[in-house]
Amino acid sequence: MEKYKRTLQRRILLMALTMIVAAVILSLQVFGFFGAELESDFSNGVVTGLQSGLLTGLILVFTFFIIRYQRATQDIVKLKLLQNKETDERTKAIKQKSGGNIVIFYSVVFILAGIIAGYYNTTVFYTLIVCAVFQLNVSAFLKIYFLKRY
């Protein structure tokens, strides 16, 4: 049980660090430190809005999971339930076949890279965001498919 608790604490730390990076980027954007010139004002507004929304969404999702994991580490019953849910053989097999945690990790990396690239080139921004969304959609589709199949 202690090993799983340490695993959750590592997840909390990684999510907190990502949240800090996202908050710093969002703060710098809000205060106008990123002033890269894009093709047009419309393009600049769309990219800025998408960047702000993605950063805010990332912060909110990670806040939800941090709170969930923090509550689980403080309550032994919740910790056991969460561990049983994650170590269930059927769940593990479905997760492995649908890409597992690595798809989520790389999608977050693509989104962060896209946000940063959006300050310099809109094509790279849109490409990275579309790739991340595509990865997440394929993973979700496979997860649903394998849930119904097994």
Image: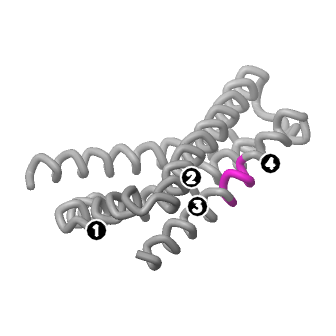
Pointers 2 and 3 in contact (C-beta within 8 Å): yes
Q: Residue 66 carries which label?
A: 2
Q: Which stretch is magenta?
A: 17-22
Q: Which amino acid does label 4 sit on?
A: Val
Pair 4/2: label in front = 2
Q: Which residue is drawn at 77% across and 25% down?
A: 40
Which picture quadrant has residue 16?
Answer: bottom right
C-alpha distance separating marks 2 and 1: 20 Å
> Which residue is situated farthest in the left direction here?
149
Q: Which residue is drawn at 48% across and 71% down?
A: 5
Dominant SS in magenta: helix
Q: Mark 4 points at which residue?
A: 24
Q: Earlier in the sequence, mark 2 or mark 3?
A: 3
Residue 128 in the image: state x and y as whole percent: 56, 48
Along the line of sight, the residue nearer the viewer: 85 or 131: 85
Count neighbours of disc 1 (C-alpha within 10 A) and say few if under 14, some if 14 to 19, many if 20 or more.
Answer: few
Identify the secondary structure beneath mark 1. helix
Residue 83 in the image: state x and y as whole percent: 34, 65
Q: Which mark is residue 12?
A: 3
C-alpha distance separating marks 2 and 3: 6 Å
C-alpha distance separating marks 4 and 1: 35 Å
Left/right of residue 44 with respect to residue 68 in the rendered view? right
Count neighbours of disc 2 (C-alpha within 10 A) and say few if under 14, some if 14 to 19, many if 20 or more.
Answer: many
Q: Earlier in the sequence, mark 3 or mark 4?
A: 3
C-alpha distance separating marks 3 and 1: 19 Å
As for residue 18 lying within the magenta part, the answer is yes
Q: Mark 1 points at which residue?
A: 87
